[in-house]
Amino acid sequence: MKNACVVGYGNIGSVHAQLLEDAPYARLVAVCDIDEAKTAALCGKKVYNDYADALRDGEVDVVHICTPHFLHVTMALAALEAGKKVVLEKPAAIDEAQWRQLRAAKGAKDVCCVLQNRYNPCVEKLLSICPDVRSIFAALTWKRDAEYYASAPWRGKWATEGGGVVINQAVHLLDLMLLFGGEAASVCATISNKSMPSIEVEDTCDALIEFESGARGVFFATNTYPTNSPMRLEIETDDALYRYSDGALYRLCKGEASVLAKDTAGVLGKPYWGSGHNKLFEDYYTYLETGNGHFVSLEDARRVTELTHALYKSAGERILLAPGGKRI
């Protein structure tokens, strides 16, 4: 059984730690955070306030990087250099240069990326149907107010967050669009800041995504909504419309609607994060133990990472993507 250290004991880091604490597939042995107040109450675990000390711990096999965005690649590279395996929270990289550096690193093929909504029961059910996609509509309406951005100095800045609603909140929804639509051929996007003049990054985005398959995607995301509503994904096929909304998967055909699946309620963290973290971790640790099976790798995260970067670069200009996700 592999031993884990959670690095960054904030909102999502505490979720990682709790799942690992209760997991039969791994052992949580340490937590690392520069804020001693966050780690003071932890009992029975090693506590590090210096990441370098955590990496020197020979008992730690895997580090879960749950730190601010701008630290993800730097910390992942240091962990790989120290011979550790890596579970990397989103985003994998905040810009193209960091993304190239991470993918080229020794051991990068074993980095696990946290795109947990792939494991939602409704998503797994829709994947099992394997619909022939004609069009995709995706929408996210969440709330991120001044209090949220004031909660940490790295939030709301291009250099440290890498963007706003797209790279932070809506990246999972973009990932699902690509999961069903396949490779993106082009993107034309608009980003704006409608409600938060105190931050640098966007709070709203709309985009047109053309897929290599010929399908068309329309994407909308905003952090200006009064509440955090469940995301919505619609996939149109030749014979039906599949709607994933409010934690349920519907099939609409000829005026009739049927429920095909329902998600499991998330027991930790924010309910709209989904409940897939545990299954994602289990797949990864099973792979580490056996060398077999599938986990969400850097290659699996390639499409959404590169589409996110292209979306920001587009900002009204159509960006063409060559096969394999490389811009031309």
Image (tube, rainbow, N blue to C red):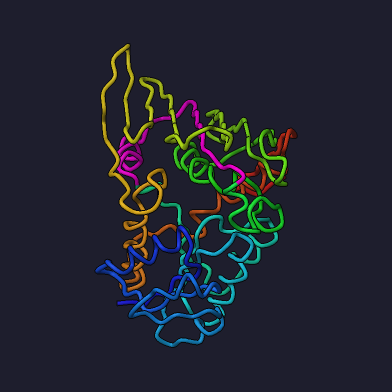
Q: Position of residue 117 (x, y in %)?
A: 40, 47
Q: Is residue 188 shown to the viewer in this render? A: no
Q: Is residue 123 shown to the viewer in this render? A: yes
| Residue range of the region highlighted in magenta in the rendering | 120-146
**Side of 255 relative to 160 (left or right):** left
Q: Position of residue 326 (x, y in %)?
A: 65, 49
Query: 310 or 275: which is nearer to us?
Result: 275
Q: Which image quadrant: the N terminus? A: bottom left
**Side of 215 relative to 2 (left or right):** right
Query: 325 or 196: which is nearer to us?
Result: 196
Which image quadrant is residue 133 in? Answer: top left
Q: Which image quadrant: the C terminus? A: top right
Q: Is residue 16 magenta?
A: no
Q: Position of residue 107 (x, y in %)?
A: 52, 73
**Side of 275 relative to 65 (left or right):** left
**Side of 162 relative to 253 (left or right):** right
Q: Residue furthest top?
A: 255
Q: Position of residue 148 (x, y in %)?
A: 57, 49
Which residue is found at the position 60% from the left and 58% from the top? Answer: 152
Which residue is found at the position 43% from the left and 24% from the top? Answer: 236
Which residue is found at the position 32% from the left and 11% from the top? Answer: 255
Picture layout, residue 180 above or below residue 85: above
Q: Residue furthest right?
A: 317
Which image quadrant is residue 310 in? Answer: top right
